[in-house]
Image (tube, coloured by chain):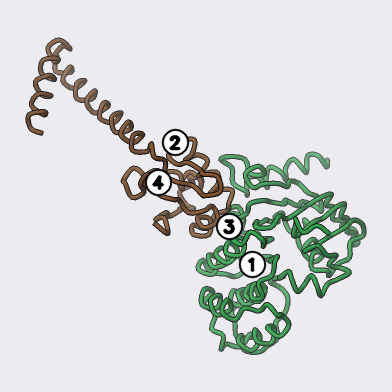
Chain colours: A brown, B green
Amino acid sequence: MSQLPITLSQASGVPFYRQIVDQIAALVRTGQLRAGDQLPSYRDLAGQVLVSLITVRRAYAELQSAGLVVRKQGRGTFVADTVTTASRAALRKQGKAALRAALDQARGLGLSAQELAPIVRALLTELENEQ
Amino acid sequence: MSQTHLVDIRGLRIDRGAFSLRIPAWTVAPGSVVGVVGPNGAGKTTLIDCLAGLIRPTEGTVRVVGRDPAAEPMFVRSRAGFMSDDRPLFDLSVARLLRMLSGYYASWDEALVEELLARFRVDPRVRVRDLSRGQGTSVRIIAALAFRPDVVVLDEPGTGLDLGARRAVLEAVLSVARDPTRSVIISSHQLADVERIADALLVLQDGRVAASGPTDEVVQDGESLEETLLVLRASGMEAAS
């Protein structure tokens, strides 16, 4: 991808580096950027979205410490290989939260954990048979 | 003379009547955008006039592209492009004015001029006296960029410009600084624009350096440059009283 689809808003009040971090993270999450893809150089991205080098550098540093990108000495910044694993982990976390909410709702009906356990097991068997 | 810094100032003092500007040390690294900000009367234009060789320092050394601008103004002006919003332009058509200026510079870039005229939406057939204030500013910016100088110095480049032209200024500034050997110095009251594109800031106040350094060190997290200036101004007044 030669130009990243990133749009910054001055009015939002969110710092520019944060907007860049969020939007690149979203591109990775949605698969528009894949493991091994090279990100634009600091200067190219700064020129594209009209911010200082400092802002881009800071955004890339945050993405790096979040494990989303890696810097290769003298070669540039790339989407990390581990990103797929990392985003699977994020999806698992979301799934867990959704299940927990559903279980809480069921308990709200007056069902105990002991009563729910066989139901959950039956549902999982059903899912596996469907696949 | 070292070429590591495009601008190198040491122990600068400029006295002009009751006003004095003092800058102990200031450098501009290649490949950077540096904002010079501060209220009116802080010394921004005095500094820029000194970089252009129009004012001789009372004390200290000033080097622009390695040379003393007061001693070698022609050399400095051939490598540094100065834009100011208040200098008059010859009353010709924009095209003729630019053609005339092109004669002074071996490095004049005709293709770049075409690109900038389009980007700033200036019709080269219009006579200079018929230009709006903003278009006049745009022509001055184009003239400062057209010979691809190592240092571009823009004094209030946002004056009278609409949003589209202000964006064109930002694009032009960043395209210069994309070259790691060239730099831009921009003095402006449009603080949000300066904060957005500047890698470093020099904050002047009453002829003194109130703050200087990388933008993210001068401006605190979660603060705007405008707020930073207010805080610096308040602490400056406290110190003076």
Give the mark, 3 or 1, whose residue is nearer the N terminus.
1
Estimate how packed mark 2 is, as few (under 14), some (14 to 19) or many (20 or more) residues with alpha carbons within 10 Å. some
Q: Which residue is mark 1?
A: B157
Q: Is residue B162 above or below residue A41?
A: below
The circle drawn on residue B193 is 3
Query: Which tag is nearer the camera, tag 4 or tag 2?
Result: 4
Q: What is the secondary structure assignment of the residue under circle 2?
A: loop
Question: How far, Cα to Cα, is label 2 from label 1?
Answer: 40 Å
Give how far across and how far down residue A109 sits, in percent. Answer: 14, 18
**In the image, what residue occupies the spot 49% across and 35% down?**
A65
Give how far across and how far down residue B69 sits, in percent. Answer: 83, 67
Question: How far, Cα to Cα, is label 3 from label 2?
Answer: 31 Å
Q: Is residue B209 above or below residue A122?
A: below
Q: Which residue is mark 2?
A: A67
Question: How far, Cα to Cα, is label 3 from label 1?
Answer: 11 Å
The chain holding disc 2 is A
Q: Do the residues bearing badges 2 and 1 touch, measured as CB atoms within 8 Å?
A: no
Give how far across and how far down residue B5 sits, in percent. Answer: 75, 56
Q: What is the secondary structure assignment of the residue under circle 4?
A: loop
The chain holding disc 3 is B
The one nearer the camera, B79 or B22, is: B79
The one nearer the camera, B182 or B132, is: B182
Q: What is the secondary structure assignment of the residue under circle 3?
A: helix
The one nearer the camera, B233 or B2, is: B2
The chain holding disc 1 is B
